[in-house]
Image (cartoon, grey):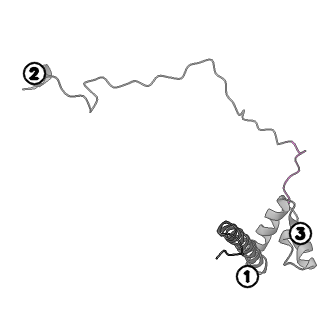
């Protein structure tokens, strides 16, 4: 008798899609749990770090999901925490970044063959030493 249901290939495809869907759902839940722990946990520095990270990437809404409006305002109004604007010029340094010289660097003196520790004494040197 013939099965009038789905074929084996169709069942396999549905199993693969179900696996991918469940995996993505678990990843979203894990990311949400990590965000909740970072924002509602005992560490205020972790909360500020998460909010600053999100603010740098224009994702304050995501970081503020678990924060009240007062907490979001308090984190957004921290003075001196904002990164400098891109239009600001860097301060001039008195020391140049690149030094160009016409002189060649000094050559290091290489040890003579008899002075090097790896050199083996030749037969004439051994006879003279005896």
Q: Is residue 84 magenta?
A: yes
- Circle 2 sits on which residue? 128
Q: Is residue 101 above or below residue 3?
A: above
Question: How packed is label 3: few (under 14 Cα within 10 Å), some, or many (20 or more)?
Answer: few
Q: Is residue 16 magenta?
A: no
Q: Nearer the viewer, residue 125 or 25?
A: 25
Residue 70, quarter of picture: bottom right
- The residue most toward the left is 130
The residue that label 3 is drawn on is 61
Which of pointers 3 and 2 lies earlier in the amino acid sequence? Answer: 3
Looking at marks 3 and 1 on the same chain, the residue that comes earlier in the sequence is marked by: 1
Find residue 81 and report its image quarter. Answer: bottom right
Q: Is residue 115 visible?
A: yes
Marks 3 and 1: CB-CB under 8 Å? no
Quadrant of the rendered image containing residue 97 = top right
Identify the residue at horizontal 89%, vertical 68% (top origin): 76
Instruction: Please give left or right for residue 4 compared with residue 123 in the image.
Output: right
Q: Position of residue 52 (x, y in %)?
A: 81, 64
Tell me the residue at 10%/21% (across/down): 128
* Secondary structure mostly taken by the magenta-highlighted segment of the chain: loop
**In this view of the protein, which residue sits in the foreground, 64 or 21?**
21
Question: Which residue shows up at 37% across the image and 25% down it?
Answer: 110
Give the spatial CA distance, label 2 vs label 1.
80 Å
Seen in the picture, residue 108 relative to 70 is either above or below; the reply is above
On the rendered image, what quadrant is the C terminus found in?
top left
Q: Are marks 3 and 2 in contact (CB under 8 Å)?
A: no
Q: Secondary structure at mark 3?
A: helix
Q: Mark 1 = which residue?
A: 42
User: Rounded to the nearest whole Å, what is the CA distance between mark 3 and mark 2?
Assistant: 87 Å
Q: Which segment did they paint magenta? A: 82-89
């Amino acid at each position: 008798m013939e099965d009038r249901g789905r074929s084996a290939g169709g069942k396999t495809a549905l199993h693969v899609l179900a696996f991918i869907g469940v995996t993505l759902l678990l990843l979203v839940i894990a990311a949400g749990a990590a965000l909740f722990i970072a924002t509602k946990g005992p560490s205020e520095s972790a909360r500020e770090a998460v909010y600053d990270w999100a603010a740098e990437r224009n994702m304050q809404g995501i970081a503020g999901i678990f924060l009240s409006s007062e907490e979001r305002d308090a984190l957004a109004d921290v003075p001196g925490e904002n990164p400098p604007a891109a239009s600001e010029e860097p301060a001039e340094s008195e020391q140049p970044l690149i030094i160009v010289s016409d002189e060649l660097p000094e050559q290091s003196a290489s040890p003579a063959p008899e002075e090097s520790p790896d050199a083996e004494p030749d037969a004439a040197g051994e006879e003279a030493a005896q």
